[in-house]
Amino acid sequence: MTAEDKEFLGQIYTFIEENLQDMDPDPQKTPVSEQIQALRPILQELAMKYKMPVEDAFIRYMDLASEAAVERDRQYRAQFEEN
C-alpha cells in the first residue's frame, strides 16, 4: 500500500471515527448501500481531491480496506505463531 493509499484510507477511517461511530469500517460487515450513503460526504471530498468519480473513490476505499484487513490478519497470525 502506497503512502497515498494509506492517506486516502486514513481519511475515510477518520471520518468514520468522527461521524459514524456505529458503522464498522470493515466493508465485509456493513451492506454496500449503507456504506455508500453514510460515506458520501467523505467520498465526494476525496473524489474532488483525487479528480475521480465518486464511484471510483468508493471502489478504491473497498479495495484498500480489504487489503488492510488482509494485512491485519497476516500480522495477527504472525504474532500468534510467535507465541
Image (spheres, rainbow, N blue to C red):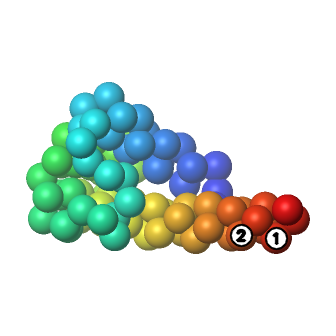
Is disc 2 placed on a helix, strand or loop?
helix
In this rendering, position of residue 78 left or right of residue 16: right
Q: CA–CA distance between discs 2 and 1?
A: 6 Å
Residue beneath the point at 55% across and 62% down: 68
Question: In the image, residue 46 lies at what x, y percent?
Answer: 34, 45
Q: Residue at x 78, y 61 (%)?
A: 79
Residue kind at label 2, given as amino acid type: Arg
Q: What residue is at 12 percent from the left and 53 percent from the top?
A: 37
* Amino acid type shown at disc 1: Glu
Question: Outermost residue toward the top?
Answer: 18
Q: Which residue is nearer to you in this view: 57 or 72?
A: 72
* Location of mark 2 (residue): 77
Q: Secondary structure at mark 1?
A: helix
Residue 41: give x, y in percent of width and height: 19, 41
- Residue 47, given in percent of the width and then of the height, sits at 30, 50
Q: Which mark is residue 30?
A: none
> Label 2: few (<14), some or many (≥20) within 10 Å?
few
From this viewpoint, which residue is outermost toward the right?
82
Question: Could you tell me if the residues under marks 2 and 1 are in contact, i.e. CB atoms within 8 Å?
Answer: yes
| Quarter occupied by the N terminus | bottom right
In the image, residue 77 sits, relative to residue 10, either above or below, namely below
Q: Residue at x 26, y 48 (%)?
A: 23
Q: Is residue 15 visible?
A: no
**Rendered view: 55 above or below 7:** below
Residue denoted by label 1 = 81
